[in-house]
């Protein structure tokens, strides 16, 4: 046990503390020997303080300091001194002072770390994840986790002030296969049966509304067994809520208030509500996706009608066969070379587009290899539709609607990023509303819920439910931040008869519905109130607020893209006895 007990943190001392006797504890960040006087920067979560070991002041402490190396854990007792004016370090909050050591105690030694514990360490992600405990020592990583903490604290404080109560829902629950695969957990007590880890608390939070809790929230872990990429993890965290006796505006207003508080708490930034709202139809028409980045313009325009009147066979055949011809105006990009435009063509190919047509705009109209197929009147119509001026580049995709939308949506972002059209310091929040309730699954020859089967249809569209289900709007809403869907929610179905109609359209028979969702259907019989809610991706939110690209940066112990934890070496084999207890045997992979 150490004789030295910490009195201050390494980020706490200032000029006003000069003359004080203090004890600091932490890690040796750097060590410098200047002509016999040893200087170290001592680091903890709160900052760094320079500690001086002068042999003329205390020979014993100086001798012990000769053994110090990076990442040793030490305690130091000494007096706070003001630094001379020419020695002040403006980069440190403690840069006006230093501690002259009277006593040093080495609490633990350290081997040489596999990488430097610095903000800008340039090592592979795999190495950082294997030694995550060292990676998390880096001040930048501690800043990220502190920001995440502030989001959670702001959320809890905000919800409590708005009469929400935090309720935990189970991790071991029933498998209800919808969307992604479930993570299954075998039961030892009930051999041959399985729990599932929840993909979301959806059914439980609806049950809580039937229970009369009125306003629920939870910062909750969710699990999905799906292929991973930068913005996905097998386990992720949601800010989840549900409210009774509400309409769409009530849920939206609560979330807008939350975002105002979060921005203030984490970034010290004032944002204003209400946020812009777009219908799903307008979002797809203008931006090609249901989570548009509104930090820049470059909206998509359709010229299918003009294409029909042209002599360009590619456009004409697509237009006459029921497809679309749509495009964007890459403002000021006529300067792009043919090679650069060819690279854009290759880019849209990966989204199913067979090609990319283009016009450059100059004082005489449109120029390109296909301009000759459009007479002067048609060229004028195109220029007018895009509000184009000399120096602009018009880019077009002709195909079925889904291909055109995805290709142009991605192209729009690509051009904006490449040409600096996005203000990276801007945060743009918006809502997308009036989603379709269903989408048609051609492969399975059936309708699927665009969100989930408990989303309420718009009351004005109930008459279309059986004859024109694709025209039925959902009472659903997504919140979008800088082109990323931050969360989604809906007003739920609270009547059993309506829920049964939805199941029939989804070709979920009564037996299957009872097997998967029987407890919810049973609960709806007993006075379920109208209710709705939403879930926000906490990991995504913090990632965007901090201007990062990978959610693993804001998760303490994330997985790789192969869903592995390199630090603890999980997943791993288990022994035969554990399998026998569960009544399981393994089929070894080839």
Image (cartoon, rainbow, N blue to C red):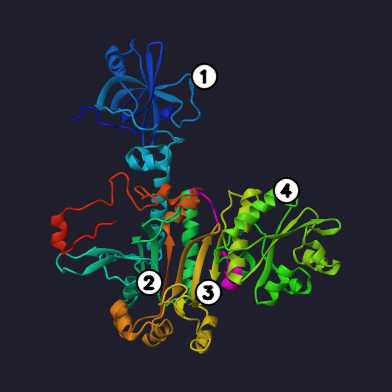
State the residue in front, 191 or 169. Answer: 191
Q: Residue 269: within the magenta?
A: yes
Secondary element under disc 1, as helix, strand or loop, is helix
What is the span of residues highlighted in magenta in the rendered image?
A: 267-284
Residue at the spot of label 3 = 435
Cα distance in 3D space between marks 4 and 3: 40 Å
* Mark 1 neighbour density, 10 Å: few (under 14) some (14–19) many (20 or more): few
Label 4: which secondary element: loop
Q: Nearer the viewer, mark 1 or mark 4?
A: 4
- The mark that comes first in sequence, 1 or 2, is 1
Between 441 and 545, the one lying in front of the other is 441
What is the CA distance from the residue labelled 3 to the residue labelled 1? 63 Å
| Residue 548 within the magenta-colored segment of the rendering | no
Coordinates of residue 462 in the picture (x, y in percent): 50, 87
Q: Residue at x 66, y 49 (%)?
A: 419
Identify the residue position indicated by label 1 in the image.
86
Q: Is residue 57 above or below residue 306?
A: above
Please say whether residue 303 is visible from this viewpoint: no
């Amino acid at each position: 046990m150490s004789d030295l007990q910490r009195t201050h943190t390494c980020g706490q001392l200032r000029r006003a503390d000069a003359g004080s006797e203090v004890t600091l504890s932490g890690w040796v960040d750097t060590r410098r020997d200047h002509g016999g006087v040893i200087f170290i920067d001592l680091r903890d979560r709160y900052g760094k303080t320079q500690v001086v070991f002068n042999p003329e002041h205390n020979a014993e402490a100086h001798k012990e300091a000769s053994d110090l190396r990076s990442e040793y854990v030490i305690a130091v007792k000494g007096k706070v001194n003001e630094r001379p004016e020419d020695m002040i370090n403006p980069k440190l909050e403690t840069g006006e002072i230093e501690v002259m050591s009277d006593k040093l105690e080495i609490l633990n030694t350290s081997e040489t770390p596999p990488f430097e514990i610095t903000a800008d360490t340039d090592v592979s992600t795999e190495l950082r994840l294997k030694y995550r405990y060292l990676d998390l020592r880096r001040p930048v990583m501690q800043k990220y986790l502190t920001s995440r903490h502030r989001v959670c604290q702001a959320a809890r404080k905000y919800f409590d002030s708005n009469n929400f109560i935090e309720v935990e829902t189970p991790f071991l629950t029933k498998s209800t296969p919808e969307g992604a695969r479930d993570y299954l957990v075998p039961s030892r007590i009930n051999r041959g049966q399985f729990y599932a880890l929840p993909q979301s608390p959806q059914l439980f939070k609806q049950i809580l509304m039937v229970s009369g809790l009125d306003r629920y929230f939870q910062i909750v872990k969710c699990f999905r067994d799906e292929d991973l990429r930068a913005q996905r993890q097998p386990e992720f965290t949601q800010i989840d809520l549900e409210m009774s006796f509400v309409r769409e505006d009530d849920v939206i207003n609560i979330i807008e208030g939350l975002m105002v508080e979060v921005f203030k708490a984490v970034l010290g930034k004032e944002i204003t509500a209400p946020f812009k709202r777009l219908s799903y139809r307008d979002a797809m028409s203008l931006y090609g996706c249901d989570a548009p980045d509104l930090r820049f313009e470059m909206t998509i325009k359709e010229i299918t009608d003009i294409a029909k009147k042209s002599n360009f066979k590619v456009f004409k055949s697509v237009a006459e066969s029921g497809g679309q011809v749509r495009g964007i105006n890459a403002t000021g990009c006529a300067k792009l070379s043919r090679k650069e435009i060819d690279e854009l063509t290759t880019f849209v190919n990966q989204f199913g587009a067979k090609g990319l047509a283009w016009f450059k705009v100059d004082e005489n109209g449109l120029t390109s290899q296909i301009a000759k197929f459009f007479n002067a009147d048609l060229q004028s119509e195109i220029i007018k539709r895009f509000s184009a001026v000399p120096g602009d580049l018009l880019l077009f995709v002709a195909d079925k609607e889904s291909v055109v939308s995805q290709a142009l949506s991605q192209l729009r972002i690509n051009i904006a990023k490449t040409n600096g059209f996005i203000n990276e310091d801007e945060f743009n929040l918006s809502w997308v509303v009036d989603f379709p309730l269903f989408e048609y699954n051609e492969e399975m020859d059936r309708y699927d819920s665009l969100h989930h089967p408990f989303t309420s249809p718009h009351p004005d569209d109930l008459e279309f439910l059986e004859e024109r289900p694709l025209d039925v709007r959902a009472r659903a809403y997504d919140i979008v931040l800088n082109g990323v869907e931050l969360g989604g929610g809906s007003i739920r179905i609270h009547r059993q008869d309506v829920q049964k109609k939805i199941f029939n359209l989804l070709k979920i028979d009564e037996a299957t519905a009872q097997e998967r969702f029987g407890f919810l259907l049973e609960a709806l019989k007993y006075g379920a109130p109208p209710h709705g809610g939403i879930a926000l991706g906490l990991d995504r939110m913090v990632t965007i607020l901090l201007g990062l690209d990978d959610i693993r940066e804001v998760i303490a112990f994330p997985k790789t893209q192969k869903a592995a934890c390199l630090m603890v070496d999980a997943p791993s084999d288990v022994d035969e006895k554990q399998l026998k207890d569960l009544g399981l045997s393994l089929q070894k992979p080839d």
